[in-house]
Image: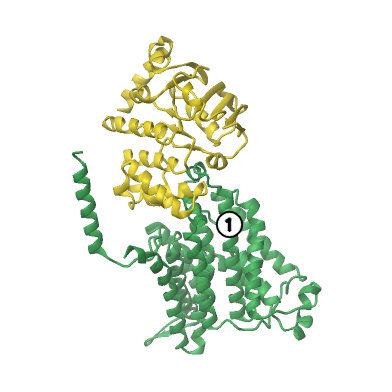
Chain colours: A green, B yellow
Amino acid sequence: MRRLDPWLQLAAPVLLVVATAIVGSFTARATEIYFLTAITSVAIVVAIYVFVGNSGVLSFGQISFVAVGAFAAGVMTVPLDSKQGVLPDLFPLLRDHTIGDVSSLALAAVVGAVFAFLVGIPLMRLSGLAAGIATFAVLEITHNLLREWTKIGPGATTLALVPETTDLTRAAIGTVVVIAAAFAYQRSRFGRSLRATREDAAAAQAVGIDVHRQRLWAFTLSGALAGLAGGLYVHMLGSITADQVYLELTFVTLAMLVIGGITSLWGAVVGALAVSGLDSFLSEAEQGVGVGAATIDLPQGARLVTLGTLMALVLVLRPSGLTGGREFRLPRPPRRRVAAADGASKEAAREPV
Amino acid sequence: MPVPDASSDQGRWPGESLRATAVSRSYEGVQALREVTVEVHRHEVVGLIGPNGAGKSTLVNLMSGFDRPTSGAIELDGHDVTRWPAHRRGRKGLARTFQHSRSFRGLSVRENVEVAAIGVGARPRDARRRATELLELLGLAARADAPAASLPHGDERRLGVARALATEPHYVLMDEPAAGLPEAEVPDFAAVVRAVRDDHEAGVLLIDHNMALIMDVCDRIQVLDQGRMLAAGTPAEIRDNLDVAAAYLGESAVEEETEA
């Protein structure tokens, strides 16, 4: 039974994502976008989790890597014949080439990884509040580069004409890849070393763990997965602005991670899906939605107010999140009681010795 | 510096020792250590005693790489490691325990030991085997799957030693390992310290206020007071040294009262 546990910890989140995709495929076209968004959110939140959850260091900057991934994949897949018209200022290398949408996802991951690695070299020396503020600075810098620099993207205008290739199948496949990578990482020697630094950085150093290096690996992997998620995101939307991968997305995805439980992969997945569901309902309700006979019509902004309140409530009432920050496990109260009694009797047997 | 009773061993590890040479450390004008020299060889237990504030923990932090000396040098098996970060010294055979155990509380007891082996480069399979052996040795096998946070105080101290040994160290610095340990468990802990010396052939620098433990297990003892090395010798010599009694034993009696 215990040997099965690790595989269940991978299978449960994967099945949840696949189930979401299957349910989504039976709904109307108008609501399909909510399922797509939910699955893509899982990819983004799991990418954030790889760094924040395993290291215990807060980062407000991971959406930067989603952003560069989204713009890299988007810019490189706009069809050549329209590209020179809509993006005339691009570097010639970017302007005169186009790649396939699957390759663009790989490119997004590579760009995200390289960017995270370079940024991480100085930043991973920080922890706590300093790390939070510095990563926030990265978000701000990235946002302004994307919004102002027309040699690498559309600048302040919308990047349009991106092929809409992220359907439910591809979103699910991409997100399962992200989950599998996160799972493999957290079971690797790197993941285990980083989790030790999360528990006690000084004690981890004393047993030979290079805290800076382990954080940098996780930050880079997180950047790669966030970049991939950004690629999925831009191919889902078909068009994107720098504002769509900035503050609000940072807030919403962090809320998802906090609400699900920061320290587990299961928490990241559950939080992303649960909050996505709620988020979709609330944004419908801001437009007015019929529930039975009644019509719910929430004022503008109600969505983010509700999410913020919920995040604050979770932090106060259940800081380890909905999942308690633990990985998925089958409920088995009878076995646990037996095990506990067994342990107690062993204790009793040891006592007289 | 005299090295009583250990001379026969030194031939087995020529040139190998952990040595702090004339190290000083001052914090914003306050001199915590002045020109202190300590040397620990493989297969011996060196006690370091002195009243609170004498600079014992400062010395351990300097030797293990968590702090840098203002002057002086630290050598580890012939390498000058004064500027090495802590994790690099850990990989080179220097382990330490902490005053408040500092276990990885969210991990299981077994994971605590495994990750220490992994930290110095062991493969996961070997780490697992090493953890099994060490938990057995230290009497923690029955609690291997419990979260480290659930351990009683005495077990947590032994987990700290298991974690240090998982790095297969040549030297182990123990910072007040018996603090808060019930008196009845002290003899067991003395056996653990001896096992580190005899079975693992490691050199131990043992800091503690428990004089019974110190006198029991140490091959030699150094006394630190107000940042200076006050005396050094065998347990018998130290016991006879009246200056030391004034500087330390009187104080420790007071401390034991306040701790109790």
Corner quadrant of residue B176: top left
Q: Which residue is at a point 50% across and 27% down the rendered structure image?
A: B41
> What is the secondary structure assignment of the residue under circle 1?
helix
> What's under tag 1, amino acid-wise?
Trp
Residue A334, visible in the rendered structure: yes
Is A234 in front, or is B131? B131
Query: Residue B20 at what x, y percent from top left?
Result: 56, 26
* Pointer 1 local density, CA inside 10 Å: few below 14, some 14–19, many at least 20: many
Q: Which residue is at a point 42% across and 17% down the rendered structure image?
A: B234
Is B29 in front, or is A308? B29
Q: Which residue is at a point 62% across and 52% down the rendered structure image?
A: A123
Chain letter for mark 1: A
- In what quadrant of the picture does the N terminus of chain A appear? bottom left
Q: In this view, does A322 lie above or below A239?
A: above
Query: Residue B160 at what x, y percent from top left?
Result: 40, 40
Residue B50, visible in the rendered structure: no
- Number of numbered labels in the structure image: 1
Query: Residue B246 at what x, y percent from top left?
Result: 40, 12
Left or right of A75, for residue A15: left
Q: Is residue A122 above or below residue A297?
A: above
Left or right of B57, for residue A150: right
Is B202 in front, or is B221? B202
Is A3 in front, or is B202? B202
Q: Name the residue under label 1.
A: A217
